[in-house]
Image (spheres, helix red, strand yellow):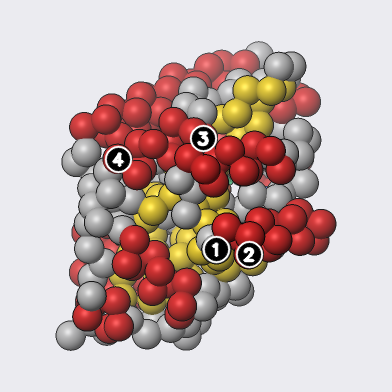
Amino acid sequence: MSTVQRFLGPSDLHMHSVRSDGTELPAEVVRSAHRHGLRTMALTDHDTTIGWDEAADAATALGMTFIPGMEFSTRRRHGGYNLSVHMLAYLFDPDNAALRTEMDRIRDDRLTRAERIVANISHDHDLTWDDVLAQRAGDASIGRPHIADALIARGLVVDRAEAFDGILHPRSGYTIPLYSPDPLRAVELIRGAGGVPIIAHPATAGRSGMLSEDELRELIEAGIAGFEIDHRENTEPGKSLLRSLAAEYDLIVTGSSDSHGAGKPNLPGENTTTDANVARILAAGTGRTATFPG
Ligand code: AMP
Ligand code: FE
Ligand code: FE
Ligand code: ZN
């Protein structure tokens, strides 16, 4: 398709705005991407598409290419523990009924869960649900980062990192897991909506580690299009395994910043995706088109 040839790199395909847990408006995220030299970007807020139109308009005004995306919350149950798996989805139909039903369910649980976490915290710390709502912009997908921002506003921690290392760490006992479908179900939903599923930061050194090689192979067989390999939180041994699987199955490989504005140190463009891989994503997504300059 000719549209596939019209984009320019460098490309950052994983960025957050205030529509989830970033700190900048979607248009500001686009402008910040442009200032960092990027010419193609994707907005990938957690479990929502509400920032797409605003970001697309800002990108058009700057002569940038905009790829609509989302970071879909999924969870693999492993007997005694749960592994949170973030699934990037690009170019899917945001009105697809099956996908929309699951997104709404996750977003509803984000509210219920955050309110319950705040109730738990409030037994020991001076924090109210209104404090947290004051940190949320409109219909943003609410999450622990908004609770962190409320703790900062109360002077209980200095930044989000301190909140996540302490009060919001699962070992503190205040947090509860978010309702999320299994990654296999997410792949089915994203593909069903014409989208391109790519596992976000698959090799983070979290408490429960990463998906096993067998689980990754099962997800590949189920339709995973690729892996986000160049991401600051992926471990070196994890990246080696991902690279060898990507080569074996000829998968798409991406690199991205996962920037959250002032919410994380990650800077736009600190990792980028090659033009060849961006072209593969553009060619594979059929649920929605990217917005091209000119
Ligand atoms: P939740 O969606 O409620 O499970 O919260 C997870 C989100 O918190 C992730 O998307 C990250 O953006 C953010 N997060 C996790 N750890 C940290 C940290 N140490 N500093 C800032 N943000 C974090
Ligand atoms: Fe986030
Ligand atoms: Fe993530
Ligand atoms: Zn992210």
Q: Mark 4 points at which residue?
A: 192
Q: Mark 1 points at which residue?
A: 250
Label 2 – label 4 distance at C-alpha:
25 Å
Task: Write down which quadrant ligand 1 falls in.
Answer: top right
Q: Mark 3 points at which residue?
A: 183
Tell me the element at label 1.
Answer: loop
Type of amino acid under label 2: Ala
Label located before the other in sequence (1 or 3): 3
Tell me the element at label 4.
Answer: helix
Contact between labelled residues 3 and 1, with CB atoms less than 8 Å apart: no
Contact between labelled residues 3 and 2, with CB atoms less than 8 Å apart: no
Question: How busy is the neighbourhood of tag 3: few (under 14 within 10 Å), some, or many (20 plus)?
Answer: many
Q: Which of these two is toward me, 270 or 125?
A: 270
Q: Which of the two discs, 1 and 4, sits closer to the camera?
A: 1
Type of amino acid under label 3: Pro
Contact between labelled residues 1 and 2, with CB atoms less than 8 Å apart: yes
- Residue pushed farthest right? 237
Q: Which of the two discs, 1 and 3, sits closer to the camera?
A: 1
Left or right of 97, for residue 91: right
Q: Position of residue 284 (x, y in %)?
A: 34, 61
